[in-house]
Image: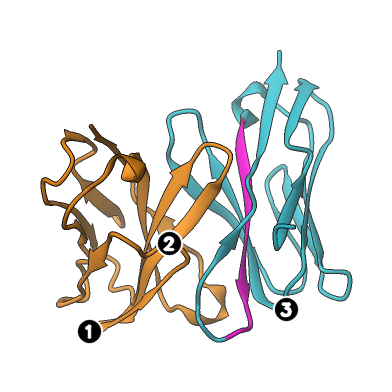
Amino acid sequence: KNEVEQSPQNLTAQEGEFITINCSYSVGISALHWLQQHPGGGIVSLFMLSSGKKKHGRLIATINIQEKHSSLHITASHPRDSAVYICAVLPTSGTYKYIFGTGTRLKVLA
Amino acid sequence: EAQVTQNPRYLITVTGKKLTVTCSQNMNHEYMSWYRQDPGLGLRQIYYSMNVEVTDKGDVPEGYKVSRKEKRNFPLILESPSPNQTSLYFCASSLRGDYGNEQFFGPGTRLTVL
């Protein structure tokens, strides 16, 4: 079992839909990151969370440390949101090594 | 412009021919890292560096070397590349390695080893 699991693996939505991507992890963490990888391959950091909730535009990320779970929500989805969304955790093991989920491939149809 | 640069962006080489992929950042970041990305496996960390002259292995360090002689540069060296090192490689940096500071990623290097 992977230490970081994402669901769903693939997601197709219609423009305007509310989207939720989930990330569950099995280790204690210092921080959790949500990353976005566009079809061209570049990776950008969307959020870094250690507790609570963050919002940036139409994107909202939440984390529940006790349940070891995070969600990324996209409101009013748009075709330009089509990308792979990757969850990454920094364990509290003290080695500063990141563990990544395998990503959720999102396609938003116009 | 704050950025992480990698060179080359694309490389096709043959087994056993030593190569270096360069990585440079202009943000005075302490933490730098190399990842490889393979279909179905996601991103995996190869090596990371907490600061100048401080490097440590990630999850898949076999067949790779790194050095951190200057704060801005973190080259990835493949002394004797093999076909199983064909992959998409990303360099990333962040202000510090602890507390999960935001990581800035380079554009990626697509390496093919024949």
| Disc number placed over residue B60 in the picture, else none | 2
Query: Please, what secondary structure does the residue beneath circle 3 have?
Result: loop
Region of the chain picked out in magenta, as a range: A83-93
Kind of residue at badge 1: Glu
Colour chain B appears in:
orange
The answer to whether the residues at label 1 and label 3 have Cβ atoms under 8 Å apart is no
According to the picture, the residue beneath numbered tag 3 turns out to be: A28
**Quadrant housing the C terminus of chain A:** top right
Q: Judge from the rendering whether residue B82 lies leftward or rightward of residue B46; answer left or right.
A: left
Both labels 1 and 2 in a single chain: yes
Secondary structure state at the residue bearing disc 2: loop
Q: Colour of chain A?
A: cyan
Residue B108 is at least partly visible in this image: no
Direction left: furthest residue: B17
Q: Main secondary structure of the magenta part?
A: strand
Q: Which residue is labeled 1 in the image? A: B53
Label 2: how many Cα within 10 Å (few below 14, some 14–19, many 20+): few
